[in-house]
Image (cartoon, rainbow, N blue to C red):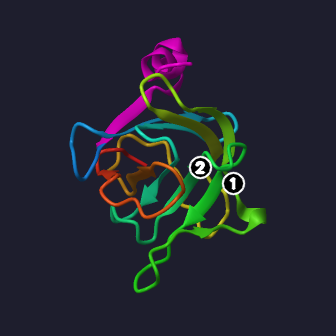
Amino acid sequence: ETSYVEWLEGGASEFYGNDVFLASAADESVGAAVFWAFNATNSTLHMAVAVPADGWVSVGFSPMGTMAESDLLMYTLESPEDVWDMYIEAPPADRAPLYDAEECSNWELVNVISATLDGMLIVEATRPMNTSDPQDYVIVDDNTTEPTLYLIAAWGDESFTYHGPDRAVSPNATF
C-alpha cells in the first residue's frame, strides 16, 4: 500500500506544481488536498485530490463558493474504473449533482490510490481546459487575476450520499 506522503514524495508534488489545502467546514485540521497543473501544449488541466475517505470524493469549481452552479468531478470506489463529470444547477433547483450527458463527460481518470496506509483516497484525473460543454467552466491558467472560480470539495465513506460536514471551499485558488 502507498501512503499519501509516499505519493507526494514519488513525484506528485513536482508534477502538479500548484496545490491548496481545503479545510473541512467542521474541522480545520481535516480536509481535501487539491493539486493541479496546466498543460499548455494540449490545453488540459491535470488535477488530483486527496481526502480522508474510503468511499467517494468530489472536487470542482464554483462561481460563489457553494454547490449552486458548480462544475464537478465525482469518483466513487463503488465504480473504481469511472470518474463522472457532474454539475449542480442554480437555485431554486434541487442541489443534488446531475450527470453531464455521456457525450459531454470530459473528465478522464488517470490514477486512483485507495485504502492507503493513512486512510487517504487519492484520485487523479484530467480534462480539457475548454470543453465546449455548457455545464463546464472554462479553466484559465492565469495567476495574475482575481479568482473567478472557487475550488470546492466534498467526500465521504461508503456509498455516495449527502456529505454533511465533510466539505470544503477555497477562495484563494485562481481559475
Please, what secondary structure does the residue beneath circle 1 have? loop
Q: Outermost residue, front direction?
A: 158
Tag 1 or tag 2, which sits nearer the N-term? Answer: 2
Q: Does residue 121 appear left or right of residue 172 in this picture?
A: right
Q: Is residue 140 above or below residue 34?
A: below
| Picture coordinates of residue 11, whole percent (x, y) | 53, 15
Kindly identify the amino acid type of the residue bearing the numbered disc 1: Asn
| Residue 63 in the figure: left or right of residue 78 | left
- Density class for disc 1 (Cα within 10 Å; few <14, some 14-19, many ≥20) is many
- x 70%, y 38%: residue: 42
Residue at position x 34%, y 52% in the image: 166
In whole angstroms, how far apart are the C-alphas of marks 2 and 1? 17 Å
Q: Which residues are magenta?
A: 1-22
Residue 138 location (% of width, % of height): 55, 57
Residue beneath disc 2: 76
Q: Toward which corner of the image does residue 135 lie, by quadrant?
A: bottom right
In depth, the one of 140 and 156 nearer the eye is: 156
SS for callout 2: strand
Residue 114 in sight: yes
Q: Amino acid at mark 2?
A: Thr
Quadrant position of residue 77: top right
Q: What residue does disc 1 label?
A: 106
Quick one: 40 or 58, which is closer to the camera? 58
Circle 2 crowding by C-alpha within 10 Å: few under 14, some 14–19, many from 20: many
Where is residue 121? Give x, y as percent: 50, 36
Residue 157 on the magenta segment: no
Q: Quadrant of the N terminus?
A: top right
